[in-house]
Image (spheres, grey):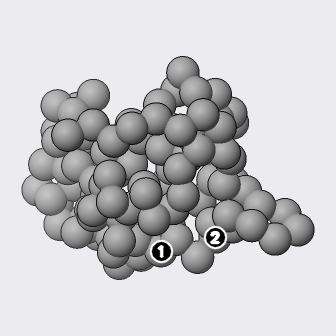
Amino acid sequence: GRRQAAAVRADLESVGERFDLVITTPLARTIETTRIAVDGLADRILLTPELCETAEDRLGGPQRGHSLAHTIQAHLFVAGWDTSHVRESGSSPNWVAGTPTPLEP
């Protein structure tokens, strides 16, 4: 996956491609793929849980019992992304909580 994302990035850079907006989900692998493939090539990267088909623990989503702040701590580059669509509380939260897992070093 990482090699494929890097290859996509190389192809995009070779033709000077840029994006106004890239939309991604908070699943850990998606965050990493987005970073490798398009971070720096997009004016705005929008992180939204609204696109998650499921948030099962087995999928490795950073939202497993963790706050957005925890996700940013685990993936520092996310701090520069647009997280305005994340709702952790209120009448219609979209950040799915589950069983917390520790950060890996």
Q: Residue at x 11, y 56 (%)?
A: 14
**Mark 2 surroundings: few (<14), some (14-19) or many (≥20) residues within 10 A:** some
| Residue type indicated by callout 2 | His
Residue 27 appears in view? no
Label disc, if present, on residue 82 of the rendered structure? 1
Residue 12 location in percent, x, y? Answer: 21, 55
Q: Secondary structure at mark 1?
A: loop
Cβ atoms under marks 2 and 1 closer than 8 Å: yes
Q: Quadrant of residue 58?
A: top right
**Mark 1 surroundings: few (<14), some (14-19) or many (≥20) residues within 10 A:** some
Q: Residue at x 53, y 50 (%)?
A: 66
Label disc, if present, on residue 85 of the rendered structure? 2
Q: Residue at x 58, y 27 (%)?
A: 57
3D distance between C-alphas at marks 2 and 1: 8 Å
| Residue type indicated by callout 1 | Asp
Q: Quadrant of residue 91?
A: bottom right
Residue 17 location in percent, x, y? Answer: 25, 64
Q: Secondary structure at mark 2?
A: loop
